[in-house]
Image (cartoon, helix red, strand yellow):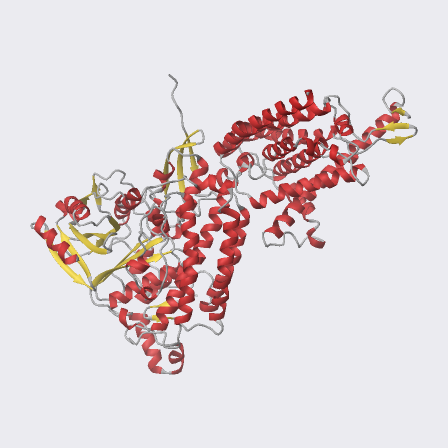
Amino acid sequence: MSEMLSLSNDPTLFIAVMLAKILVVFIVVILIVAYATYAERKIIGHMQTRLGPTMTGPLGLLQPIADGLKLFFKEDIIPSQASKLAFILAPMMILVPAFITVAVIPFGDSITVKGYTVPLQISDLNIGVLYILAMSGLGVYGIVLAGWSSNNKYSLLGGVRSAAQMISYELAAGLAIISVFMLSGTLQLSDIVAAQSGSILNWYIFSQPLAFCLFVITSLAEVNRTPFDLPEAETELVSGFCTEYSSMKYALFFMAEYANMVVLSAITATLFLGGPAGPFPGPINLLIKVFAFMFFFIWIRATFPRVRYDQLMYLGWKVFLPLALLNIVITGAVVVF
Amino acid sequence: MSQAVVAKLKGAFAASVLDVKEHRGEVTVTVKKEDIVPICQFLKDEAGYNFLCDLCGVDYLGQQPRFMVVYNLYNIATKERLRVKVPVAEDDACVDTVSTVWATANWHERECWDLMGISFNNHPDLRRILMPADWEGHPLRKDYPLQGPDREPYQGRLS
Amino acid sequence: MAKKETMTINMGPQHPSTHGVLQLVLELDGEIVVDAVPHIGFLHRGVEKLAENRTYHRALPLTDRLDYLAPMSNNLGYVLAVEKLLGITDKIPQRAKVVRVMMAELTRIKSHLVWLATHALDIGAMTVFLYCFREREAIMDMYEKLSGARMTSNYFRIGGLSQDLPEGFEDDVRAFIEAMPGHIETYEGLLTGNKIWQKRTIGVATISAEDAIDIGLSGPALRASGVDWDLRRDNPYSGYEEYDFNVIVRDGCDTFDRYKVRLDEMRESCKIIAQALDKLEPGPILADAPDVCLPPKKDVVNSIEGLIHQFKLITEGCKPEPGEVYQSVEAPKGELGFYIISDGSGNPFRMKIRPPSFVNLQALPQMVRGRLLADVIAAIGTLDIVLGEIDR
């Protein structure tokens, strides 16, 4: 076993490798985000007896680029009554946590570079899961700020809804994955993956089906996807917190939504589906799992209506939270005896 | 059937029924406007006309009295229709509201006020409904020009 | 004690789910609606005033633009009223009556499809929207074949129809009504058993039968409150008494039952159309009443008599004897009434339209008071309003 690459044994190589990893992961996530919009339009299109984009490039494959360019060159409008600083900061505050969460997700086994072992993970924090929860909690501020700073009542309602929704579901999601730590005995994502290695039956989806279901549903709520897309319910709140946004800032909201989808899919895959384990090289396995979840999210959007605000709260506090607690108790009992 | 109702109405409000007409099988009763609310209440309670289909004003410009307020009633149980009309003079263009009898009259009466300029006493919320709140005049009156006030009449397209 | 403050928000006239240019001023306490005040009139065109300045024939196209989602129902109401005023109701040929019923029922399906599409979209179910519009497109194509226009058909005429059915039209209709029940199953599959849909609709925006009658609700909205009243059966017109169909009545008084009533009505409409197709027999399509009916186009362009005939009717119009009639039809949205007064001239002296949406919209405030903001959207959808008809 060769030595682990670190800042002390070869600083230059360490920084180079680190930057390379960050760049690759960032570009891959950006590409997935861009083509997730394309995939969503195509998949939902075909589910709804439409074709989706077809005109830009072969099969409309250049559509995300065309959309991006269009939004980039649009006039950037800031309402005169808006709170300017917060209005500009808000989209970034949503996007940045979404992207930096990717840092702790392991996407493959270690590789060897110049005799040093390099883990395929940007940063292997020993409190990785806590970091994920913290970052997704930060995302709420962006939405609340966006809703508040727009100085628009619909946006405000969207922001308030979002705050309530995220906090309620964060709790249920957090409690749902506690049972995973109880089994693995660690908060470090690489160790959680290691604990699921070996047979496919070691995956936590089989030992923790309830926690898995709870986590998938609550992550739908956390990324504001149908049927929990109340903060931006366009038929009720026009467009919720992003009503007043235009141009690139609006695009940032969308990128954040899809980035959050990618990240939460990756986290679910890591926590419950063995992360990069599978028949192919590690990163490809992870991507397959991520895409499967993304497809599921899109499919749900084509199928379900939207729940109402009070029903959402009821579901979060009176169904998911007790279920998650019950799951912890059962897991605890199983672990102890 | 409608005839029986008219007879009953005549019995109860002999002094108020001014005229009864039948045209194409539809019965129209003209009554005095002072008694419209009791008559409507009577028709609803005693004769079963529980549904007010429509209420509108008609402008007979040049005749006396100038306006008519028309109530189209329907009896959901017997599927009968009855029309009640009330003459309204121009210098006293107001009628008691029947929105206490049928709540649906509320908007109909607002519309009648808005477009015909007949006001309704004791109406809960007599505002303009279709025209802008600051509009002057009542467009459905016969002396209101089709093209609107202060505009040349439409001469057809010149091209 | 602190003063309890409410927030006033303007919903509309530019809002994605007010179905046009309805403005609702909502008084909100958090997300709970304290009061809702509808403001209408943004689309007021003065149809009644315009009609007074046109002949009876030329006022017909105005009615297309009332409920633009169900133009033929409006046409039907108007031509029936004028025919009654003229006293030629008995002279309408059988073929015209059957085609009128058939088209009115197709129009009902068309209107209900748009209602279901937008209602589902408002509640968040996007897929149903596109499925419904796919079927609506088929009806639009039939409209186009029939009258040349997809929306403003203007196909019926006083005394009959403007032209006979085109070649192969009956096969189109038959194919459509054979496929339609399956499509309705698909919509039901996506919505009826869906827990979220049930949660969003059952017990939402309720109105009791007494309140509904008092406020003047009509059509499916009234029948879902348990009032068994359908003008097609109770005051039949255009030969509806010859058809066998059920009047759908449910007594849940809520959004879900209004949804079920309309879906079942579409199925009943398919049955009526099938019967109408069986009744279709060749024959005249215009009443034998030359002082009323416009002459056929081929007479107008080929003979001087026909030209003069057309010219007289267009410029002077048909002249009913003085009198007044109220004729109503069961439009997709409720009772659509036309009250027409004739003074013996070629123009209607007064034409009052009783638009069902106008009256139904009145019930909105009492349906949504004390409920959540999201229920306002459901209530607007379930009332099935069309602003073209409300504002006239």
> Which residue occupies the foreground of this view, C366 or B85?
C366
Q: Considering the image in quadrants, where does the C terminus of chain A appear? A: top right
Residue C80 in the image: x percent, y percent?
Answer: 30, 64
**Residue reaching furthest right?**
A115
Give the vertical position of C335 relative to C169 (above or below). above
- Left or right position of A163 against C257: right
Residue A115 visible? The answer is yes
Residue A228 in the image: x percent, y percent?
Answer: 55, 36
> Which residue occupies the foreground of this view, C153 or A105?
A105
- Left or right position of C90 against A111: left
Residue A137 in the image: x percent, y percent?
Answer: 62, 26
> Which residue occupies the foreground of this view, C260 or B21?
C260
**Residue reaching furthest front?**
A337
Residue A174 occupies quadrant:
top right
> Which residue occupies the foreground of this view, A70 or C22?
C22
Give the vertical position of A324 relative to C42 (above or below). above
Residue C62 visible? The answer is no
